[in-house]
Image: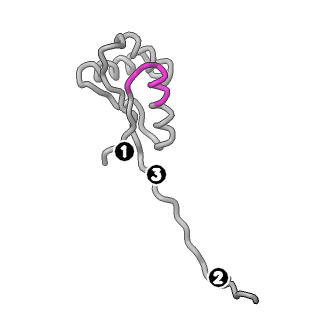
Amino acid sequence: MSASIATPDLEEVTHLSAAPLEPWQVVVWNDPVNLMSYVVRVFRTYFGYSQERATQLMLAVHHDGHAIVATGPRETMEVHAQAMHDYGLWATVRKAKA
């Protein structure tokens, strides 16, 4: 007993397009544990920010409760958030607002 297997028509053309890459953000949140100088050092060491930029971001964390420290593809931002956790900072990943 043999069964017939349907095969696609070879003339059929399929158009594939990649979904647009939506930017994601790493948000570092304020905490009562880490010193401000330590947070600046983490931003400089990990992200390579200048002293001035790292200080601006740290002050945003301190005064506003959080700061967006990186934006990019989701997978990369998840790696950055994990690195912040490894440094003892509280970080989350969220979709960038349009």
Q: Give amino acid for label 3.
A: Leu
What is the total number of numbered labels drawn onto the structure image?
3
Q: Secondary structure at mark 3?
A: loop
Mark 2 = which residue? 8
Outermost residue toward the front?
1
**Inter-mark Cα distance, 2 to 3:** 31 Å
Q: Position of residue 79 (x, y in %)?
A: 51, 34
Res 31 → quadrant: top left
**In the rendering, which numbered label is found on residue 21?**
3
Q: Secondary structure at mark 1?
A: strand
**Inter-mark Cα distance, 3 to 1:** 11 Å
Q: Position of residue 32 (x, y in %)?
A: 29, 15
Range of the magenta residues? Answer: 82-90
| Disc 2 and disc 3 in contact, CB within 8 angstroms | no
Q: Give amino acid for label 1.
A: Lys
Sort mark 2 into few (<14), some (14-19) or many (20+) by Cα contacts within 10 Å.
few
Mark 1 = which residue? 95
Q: Earlier in the sequence, mark 3 or mark 1?
A: 3
Give the residue displayed 47% in from the left and 43% down from the top: 73
| Disc 3 and disc 1 in contact, CB within 8 angstroms | no
